[in-house]
Image (cartoon, rainbow, N blue to C red):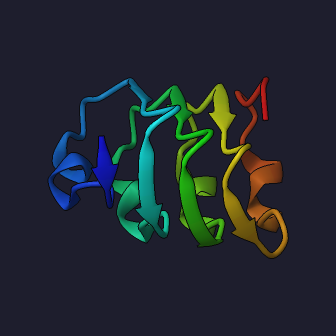
Amino acid sequence: FSGTVPYELYHLDNMEQICLRNNSLSGTISPFVYLLHDLELLDISHNNMTGCIPPEIGELYKLETLKLDGNHLSGRIPENFADLEMLREL
């Protein structure tokens, strides 16, 4: 699986888990990720993602696991991640 994360994925608002690790995904993490309000696991590790981690991830209050390692992300972890009370693995 290569290319960017399809925009249509962000319309699956009842999705609880997204695992796209070990692909050849590129581009940035879309700020539209906040639309996935039921998301508990987001794993896009070991791809070719670039850019900053969008602060909109900090609005995913049910998020328990976030795996972004193995990419080419830059910048700081958004401050609002401190509000992710369910987050257990980063």
Seen in the picture, residue 76 relative to 3 is either above or below; the reply is below
**Count of labels shown?**
0
Horizontal arrangement in the rendering, residue 34 relative to residue 58 (left or right): left
Q: Residue at x 22, y 55 (%)?
A: 6
Q: Whole-percent x and y of residue 86?
A: 70, 27
Seen in the picture, residue 41 relative to 5 is either above or below; the reply is above
Closer to us: 83 or 49: 49
Q: Residue at x 21, y 60 (%)?
A: 7
Closer to us: 78 or 28: 28
Q: Quadrant of the N terminus?
A: top left
Q: Residue at x 84, y 70 (%)?
A: 76
Seen in the picture, residue 82 relative to 30 is either above or below; the reply is above
Closer to us: 4 or 90: 4
Q: Residue at x 43, y 48 (%)?
A: 24
Quarter occupied by residue 54: bottom right
Quarter occupied by residue 78: bottom right
Horizontal arrangement in the rendering, residue 46 relative to residue 22 (left or right): right
Q: Quadrant of the C terminus?
A: top right
Q: Whole-percent x and y of residue 5?
A: 32, 55
Horizontal arrangement in the rendering, residue 55 relative to residue 3 (left or right): right
Q: Whole-percent x and y of residue 40?
A: 51, 26
Seen in the picture, residue 87 relative to 5 is either above or below; the reply is above
